[in-house]
Image (cartoon, rainbow, N blue to C red):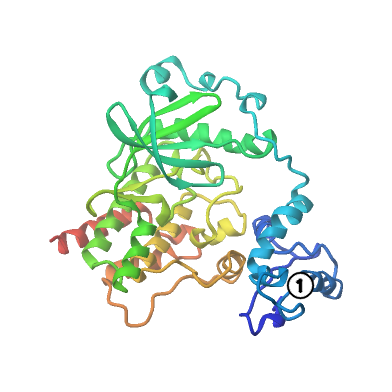
């Protein structure tokens, strides 16, 4: 719905859906959490709802300094406030605000998930970790720079939020991530150091990567220099990601990352230190396809994921294509689009990211990206095919 009342303040798109709309579950979830849940059968009935939302806008109420109208000038902020207080409860029901207690969730002894040999090798006493500054945060956890055994590490913790019911899935995914990461070992996958599995102090200890995420590096690069990284850096980073993903896809059963994106690629002190991280949404592909379900970030998600279809490891290849685009353009993908618009553009209309005209990048890099963006998952290249191409490029551009 186009909000014409905000012409003088900047146009605003208000996402809506009706019961009769043929939307995917993901599309409905995105709208419910980031827009307006109309719940009416036709547009005429929806108008009154929109009108209520706009009744305190600066075009209706006089905006005096410090007035309520001024405080609500940012329509996006108001949507988020309403989303927290009203829409969430309408869609998902009342959610108690008390802190979750892990011991009430059937996870009162996380050690039972791991055998004695695993515990001897990987279990870490939470009290032995010296916590430093927080360096990251997510929906259900935080990441800290810390010290353990005389070494600097990154510690990913799980923070109880909301009801026990709300925390069941995050706890299971966290424990799954611990088990999965403890079985991995590759130069291009962030190293697992150990884990605290004494409920409720659940935490994962990982190697600390001083370069931070690729997403932040690209943002700083554009802000400081106004141009992408050098070609040699692009190639080295792409090569490192491809090697790490090739390793994951070569596991038996295959590991599908499901949330490969530039924020989940960490860098060391040089571009030769590139590592894939964050396996909270990863799945073992024990059959031909992975079941659909919540997960991923729309800007990096393949069309079949956005449509909530069955998918396989080729969704990671699509995400890799988005990262290649980021490396070559040095911008956030779909930076001007609401996540809901990305769902429709990529999932329904078959659109994809395109390189600006005249951009100077290696033809082989462009060809890989084009292959990653094939609408038919079966036509996308595999990482075992991508890595040799990047190996040749790496040798060609070796400093």
The relative height of residue 267 versus residue 35 in the rendered view (above or below) is above
In percent of width and height, residue 321 lies at 40, 62
Instruction: Compare residues 129 and 256 and report the one nearer the observer.
Output: 129
Instruction: Compare residues 315 and 385 and report the one nearer the observer.
Output: 315
Q: Is residue 86 left or right of residue 125?
A: right
In percent of width and height, residue 364 lies at 28, 68
Residue visible at 63% across and 24% down in the picture: 103
In percent of width and height, residue 73 lies at 66, 72
- Numbered marks: total: 1
Instruction: Compare residues 210 and 304 and report the one nearer the observer.
Output: 210
Residue visible at 54% across and 60% down in the picture: 298
Q: If the image is split into quadrants, where does the N terminus sit?
A: bottom right
**Residue found at the far bottom of this picture:** 8
**Residue found at the far left of this picture:** 399
Q: Residue 193 is drawn in which quadrant?
A: top left
The relative height of residue 81 versus residue 210 in the rendered view (above or below) is below
Instruction: Compare residues 94 and 135 and report the one nearer the observer.
Output: 135
**Residue found at the far front of this picture:** 65
Q: If the image is split into quadrants, where does the C terminus sit?
A: bottom left
Residue occupied by mark 1: 56
Q: Residues within 10 Å of mark 1 (few under 14, many from 20)?
A: some
In percent of width and height, residue 35 lies at 69, 63
Residue visible at 64% across and 64% down in the picture: 77
Q: Is residue 250 left or right of residue 272?
A: right
Q: Secondary structure at mark 1?
A: loop
Q: Residue 208 is drawn in which quadrant?
A: top left
Q: Is residue 67 left or right of residue 112?
A: right
């Amino acid at each position: 719905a186009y909000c014409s009342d905000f012409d003088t303040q900047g146009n605003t798109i208000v996402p809506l859906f009706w019961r009769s709309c043929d939307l995917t579950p993901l599309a409905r979830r995105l709208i419910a959490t980031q827009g307006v849940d109309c719940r009416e059968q036709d547009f005429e009935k929806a108008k009154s709802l929109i009108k209520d939302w706009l009744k305190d806008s600066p075009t209706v109420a006089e905006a005096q300094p410090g007035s309520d109208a001024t405080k609500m000038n940012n329509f996006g902020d108001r949507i988020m406030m309403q989303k927290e207080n009203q829409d969430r409860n309408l869609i998902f029901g009342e959610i108690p605000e008390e802190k979750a207690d892990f011991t009430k969730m059937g996870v009162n002894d996380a050690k039972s998930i791991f055998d004695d040999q695993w515990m001897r090798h990987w279990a870490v006493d939470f009290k032995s970790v010296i916590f430093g500054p927080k360096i990251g945060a997510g929906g259900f956890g935080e990441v800290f720079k810390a010290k353990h055994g005389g070494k600097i590490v990154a510690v990913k913790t799980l923070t109880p939020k909301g009801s026990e019911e709300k925390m069941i899935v995050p706890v299971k995914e966290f424990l799954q991530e611990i088990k999965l990461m403890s079985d991995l070992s590759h130069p291009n996958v962030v190293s697992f150091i150990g884990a605290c599995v004494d409920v409720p102090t659940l935490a994962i200890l990982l190697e600390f990567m001083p370069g931070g995420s690729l997403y932040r590096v690209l943002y700083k690069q554009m802000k400081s220099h106004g141009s992408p990284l050098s070609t040699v850096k692009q190639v080295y980073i792409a090569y490192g990601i491809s090697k790490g993903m090739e390793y994951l896809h070569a596991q038996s059963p295959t590991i599908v990352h499901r949330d490969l994106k530039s924020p989940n690629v960490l860098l060391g002190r040089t571009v030769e230190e590139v590592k894939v991280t964050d396996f909270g949404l990863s799945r073992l592909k024990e059959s031909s396809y992975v079941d659909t379900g919540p997960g991923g970030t729309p800007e990096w998600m393949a069309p079949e994921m956005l449509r909530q279809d069955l998918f396989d490891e080729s969704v990671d290849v699509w995400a890799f294509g988005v990262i290649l685009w980021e490396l070559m353009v040095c911008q956030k993908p779909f930076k001007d689009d609401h996540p809901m618009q990305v769902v429709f553009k990529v999932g329904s209309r078959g659109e994809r990211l395109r390189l600006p005209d005249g951009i100077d990048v290696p033809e082989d890099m462009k060809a890989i990206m084009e292959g990653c963006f094939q609408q038919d998952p079966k036509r996308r290249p595999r990482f075992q095919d991508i890595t040799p191409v990047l190996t040749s490029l790496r040798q060609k551009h070796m400093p």
